[in-house]
Amino acid sequence: MQTFRYNLTGQWYKGNTHTHSTASDGGLDFVQLADLYAGAGFDFLFRTDHWVCSDAEHDPQPYPLLWLDGIEFDGTDDNGVFYHVVGLGRVEGIRREDGMHAALRSAREQGALLIQAHPAWCGNELHDWQGWRFDGVEVYNHVCRWLNGKGDGLAHWNAALAQDPGTLGLAVDDTHLGAEHPGWNGGWLMVNAAECTRPAILQAIRRGDYYASTGPEFLGFALEGNVLTVRTSPVRFIRLVGPRWHGMRQGSFAEGGLRAEASFILPAHWDYLYLEIEDDCGRRAWTNHLWV
């Protein structure tokens, strides 16, 4: 039996799941990153330095936001496919010299969420998701958009959803904050959790109880029978997106004006469906597949 994903019994917490520090190739340390992001209204960050097993829980430094553990792997697996993969959650004993394949296998065995990072930037084919059946795909990567315009992973996410509707979609900064990678606060998650603690945030992300955004906000959902009403910040378009050519839209350039609410009859025959909103500047936000 399918259940509507968003129960909205918690609070919304803003966070970034792809962050680099001076522990690998980032330009700022954990204190500087926390101060910067907290000042922009963020509630949590994941430490995802390249091949660094983090231990935020035992860091005695006080921070103005919550740090969570993660890691990023980069390299070619035993099947010859080049990936960047973000692991969300605490992992131990993983070393670059053991190779990409062994690292991904170990991270999965330790319970980390495996996220296919910036697949367009990596040159991944749509079917490359199947090699590891990743838990999620980066729908938007801010730094990769800055570097060469290849920050859009929507096609890869939709290809994954066609195989597994539970595949998560994430918008991220991929923060480096160096001369070559200055962008930040361009992609984030808004997580619906009971509290801003490591277990609650990670569990909510694992459930997909969040939305990914580059600017617009989802403010509420109401489901009555098969009719979904969504409230948003002022946007130009509100879209219900399904597989292949399937989709519905409210809003157009010709009509003019912005909207902050829409209702859709949810089709029963679509393999997956999610909401996408787009504001007047072209910034977008996405839910996950609406059913669990």
Image (cartoon, rainbow, N blue to C red):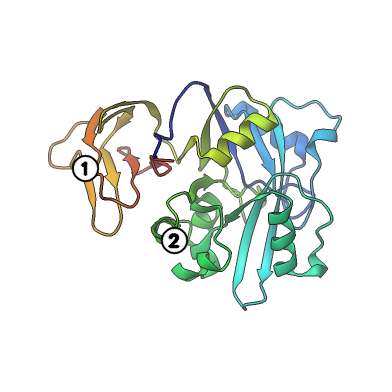
At label 2, counting other C-alpha atoms closer than 10 Å, the crowd grade (few under 14, some 14-19, many 20 or more) is: many
Residue 270: tell me if it is visible: yes
Residue 281: tell me if it is visible: no
Residue 279 left/right relative to 136? left
Pick the front one: 229 or 174: 229
Which residue does the image show at 66% across and 33% down from the upper left? 36
- Image quadrant occupied by the N terminus: top left
Which residue does the image show at 40% across and 44% down from the upper left? 289
Look at the numbered discs 1 and 2 and tell me whether their residues touch, using CB distance below 8 Å: no
Which residue does the image show at 75% across and 27% down from the upper left? 63
Against 155, residue 224 (above or below) is: above
- Image quadrant occupied by the C terminus: top left
The three-letter code of the residue at mark 2 reads His
Against 143, residue 185 (above or below) is: above
Against 97, residue 86 (above or below) is: above
Residue 104 left/right relative to 260? right
The three-letter code of the residue at mark 1 reads Arg
Which residue does the image show at 44% across and 68% down from the upper left? 126
Q: Secondary structure at mark 2?
A: helix
Pick the front one: 267 or 31: 267
Q: Secondary structure at mark 1?
A: strand
Q: Pinpoint residue 162: horizontal percent, then vertical percent.
A: 38, 59
Q: Pinpoint residue 103: horizontal percent, then vertical percent.
A: 74, 62
Pick the front one: 15 or 88: 88
At label 1, counting other C-alpha atoms closer than 10 Å, the crowd grade (few under 14, some 14-19, many 20 or more) is: some
* Residue named by callout 1: 249
Q: Pinpoint residue 167: horizontal percent, then vertical percent.
A: 48, 51
* Residue named by callout 2: 156
Q: CA distance from mark 1 to mark 2?
A: 22 Å
